[in-house]
Amino acid sequence: MKKLALLAICASLIVLLPVRPVSALTVPEKLVYELSWTGIKAGTAVQEVALKGGELHIVSTTHSAGWINPFFPVDDRTESVLVRGGSSEQFGTPKYFKEKINEGKFHALKEAHFDPQGLKVATKDFLKKTEKIDPISNKTFDTLSSIYVVRSMELVPGQSVFIDIYDCKRLWNTEVQVVRREEIDTPLGTFKTLVVKPHLKSEGLFARTGDVTVWLTDDSLRIPVMMVTKVKLGKIKAVLVGGSYWPQRED
């Protein structure tokens, strides 16, 4: 059950090369997910994005359900800051990333400062008390901001794309496979979706929890409405249940 309540941010590792933009990002935005394990509610995750002084601030929080807390409490917060470019079609450049993870006996507290001009990133691990500088490419994103990148790009079923992703350990070239179109039912209604599968080599969320599939709405906004990952004992699912996402619509 490790990483049980983190599934709602799994799509943050899905990234694409800068191809033709689909639409502008809807800001502010709030996505609320219900997390379940083998059909039992296991927690809640919230992912929000806001524009502050020309910077995009993305925050994801995850909390375990009450019945899990006595033996596996989860209290996570991940933050990403990007500097927006001069063009409205340019998503932005990573500036800062921080993750605070508390899941049972596992704890992590890291931050990364990106230098896109120098093509490097400075990372601190506060619990291990280590610091390092790693090289990056000019198309590198952190694990949280990447979900908003993929939603601004064109997705073609049957094709794979590749992008560099930095996970506070090293830079990985990640394949993203666009599998098919599919209509699914959720608590918010029926959606036409694009099914996407990332293939990660890193020691991040996907590598620890197993095979992951993500359903994005097949429209200009590419809202991640459902995410499923296989684990040793069953499956973990994150389903969108509320928030503020489509223009002039709130739940």
Image (cartoon, helix red, strand yellow):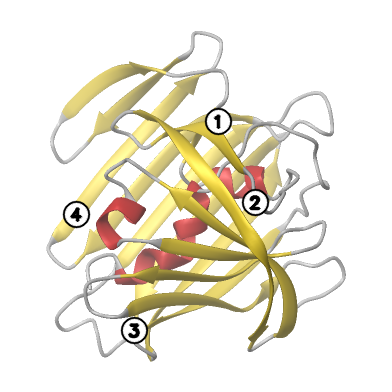
Sequence-wise, the earlier of marks 1 and 3 is: 3
Where is residue 134? Give x, y as percent: 34, 18
Q: Nearer the viewer, residue 37 or 104?
A: 37
Which residue is denoted by mark 4 in the rendering? 107
Inspect the image, locate mark 3, and give the three-letter code of the amino acid beneath it.
Ala
Marking on residue 158: 2
Please tell me how crowded label 1 is: few (under 14), some (14-19), or many (20+) other residues with Cα within 10 Å. many
Sequence-wise, the earlier of marks 1 and 4 is: 1
Where is residue 220? Give x, y as percent: 82, 56
**Image position of 94 (left or right of 159):** left
Where is residue 20? Give x, y as percent: 80, 36
Please tell me how crowded label 2 is: few (under 14), some (14-19), or many (20+) other residues with Cα within 10 Å. few
Inspect the image, locate mark 1, and give the three-letter code of the amino acid beneath it.
Pro
| Figure quadrant of the N terminus | bottom left
Tell me if residue 145 can be seen: no
Marking on residue 94: 1
Gap in angstroms between the C-alphas marked 4 and 3: 18 Å
Q: Nearer the viewer, mark 2 or mark 4?
A: 2
Gap in angstroms between the C-alphas marked 1 and 2: 29 Å
| Secondary structure category for the residue under label 2 | loop
Q: Nearer the viewer, residue 221 or 128?
A: 221
| Secondary structure category for the residue under label 4 | strand
Inspect the image, locate mark 4, and give the three-letter code of the amino acid beneath it.
His
Find the residue positioned furthest to the right.
248
